[in-house]
Image (cartoon, helix red, strand yellow):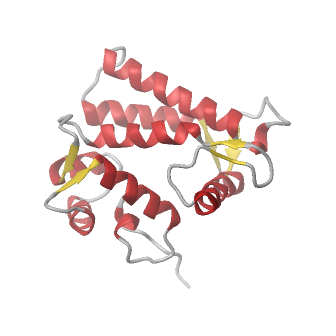
Amino acid sequence: MTVSRQDFFELLKKTARIRQWKTGSPGYKKAAERLAGFWSALMTGNKRYRNNALQAHIKLDEWLQYWSDFVMAAYDEGDFPVKSCHRIAPVSYAWHTNFLEFLFELMDVSGDGVIDKSEFTNCFAEFSLSPEECGKAFDEMSKDGEIKKDEFAKLWYQYLTSTEESDPGNSLLGKLYTPAE
């Protein structure tokens, strides 16, 4: 199993459906540029690819190690978002701040600066999550029926770093599933 540029293209197609953009529309083009930039930054900024510039995918174990390093860098910095890490080799995480903004904007279809339950549910329906599951996840995370950008960033950080299954951030991408023992 790998993560490839094609996975980011699939995200672009889902984004276009969520936002109701036609191929070639200004919103579609902007999203395509942003996602291509994320992929490029991920490939060039990850220590795993400094010796193999031609590798066009990330193996699952490398992807998991990348995120593990990101989490450890966040712990080391005591802050979020982390821009870089020098634990083993220089790794740039600068793209991550823009990716987080992209995710928030994807869900905030109205552009009012908050994600409401309807926006959250409609977004994740595109990723095959049930409306009931989305509603429950949203209720676990939201304050006053909405999620503001700064709250979203905290939930994302919690999603990436939490060791407690019950933490609200673990509902950010739907129900957290753990392997059967």
- State whether residue 28 appears in this view: yes
Up the image or down, 5 lies above or below 127; here it is above
| Residue at (58% x, 58% y) in the render | 74
- Which residue in the rendered view is the most extreme toward the right? 51
Q: Position of residue 87 (x, y in %)?
A: 76, 55
- Which residue in the rendered view is the most extreme toward the front? 78
Q: Is residue 19 left or right of residue 98?
A: left
Q: Is residue 31 left or right of residue 27?
A: right
Up the image or down, 121 lies above or below 24; here it is below
- State whether residue 128 appears in this view: no
Up the image or down, 99 lies above or below 172; here it is above
Q: Position of residue 111 (x, y in %)?
A: 21, 34
Residue 175 versus residue 167: which sits nearer the camera? Answer: 167
Q: Position of residue 27 (x, y in %)?
A: 32, 21
| Residue at (74% x, 49% y) in the render | 86
| Residue at (33% x, 43% y) in the render | 104
Residue 154 versus residue 43: which sits nearer the camera? Answer: 154
Q: Is residue 50 left or right of residue 157?
A: right
Q: Position of residue 57 (x, y in %)?
A: 68, 39
Residue 58 versus residue 37: which sits nearer the camera? Answer: 37
Q: State the image quarter where residue 78 is shown.
A: bottom right
Count of numbered marks: 0
| Residue at (30% x, 20% y) in the render | 22
Q: Is residue 152 left or right of residue 68?
A: left
- The C terminus lies in quadrant: bottom right
Q: State the image quarter where residue 61 is shown.
A: bottom right
